[in-house]
Image (cartoon, grey):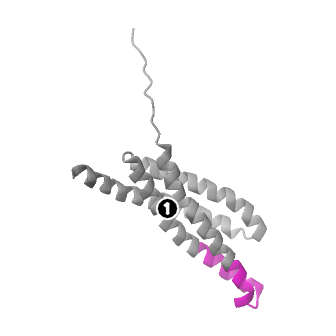
Amino acid sequence: MGQIGINMISINFKSIFLGFLAGPFVAGIVSMANNYLAVSLVPVIFTSLSAGINWINGYFLISNFLINAAFSLLGGYVAGRVAKQDEYLYAVAVAILGVSATIGLSMLTAQKFNLPFMQLSHVFKLLLTTIPYAMLGAYLSHAKNIKEDIN
């Protein structure tokens, strides 16, 4: 009789948790502070509310893109360095967890600020920054892990 064996999958939750803290968690805090500052500056800078909202929409898109790119790279790097194997898998896990948290929180805050464009910026964040930059971070950590293994 043949046996059907089930291989145990080992998941390094520590690498996902630390990667999330270093990347998406800090990015969320920086983005919220950045967004709050931008919204509070509108009455000071602009006399027209519509001009202020147009500026905020563009500012949110660009600044959140840059913040997310930097911290996605860091989160992917940290996850890969802690895991020391399957770096890309852990980087994608961190990216998906971060995007899920971002979209969930943005649903709460977008209603408060009544800025539906914020939702669109989160879709761009997923497609253009989070996963590719997390993968770049994993690539850098993989190269570092290989270099340490050789030495």
User: In the picture, residue 57 is in which quadrant?
Assistant: bottom right
User: In the picture, residue 106 is in which quadrant?
Assistant: bottom right
Any part of residue 131 in sight: yes
> Is residue 133 shown left or right of residue 53?
left
Quadrant, the N terminus: top left
The x, y position of residue 24, in whole percent, is 55, 60
Amino acid type, residue under disc 1 in the picture? Ser
User: In the picture, residue 3 is in which quadrant?
Assistant: top left
Any part of residue 114 in sight: no
Q: Which residue is mark 1?
A: 72
- Name the residue: 48% across, 68% down: 70
Majority SS type along the magenta span? helix
Residue at the top extreme, as displayed? 1
Of residues 78 and 72, which is closer to you in this image?
Answer: 78
Residue at the left extreme, as displayed? 151
The x, y position of residue 56, in whole percent, is 67, 79
Q: Which residues are magenta?
A: 38-61
Q: Callout 1: few (<14), some (14-19), or many (20+) C-alpha neighbours within 10 Å? A: many
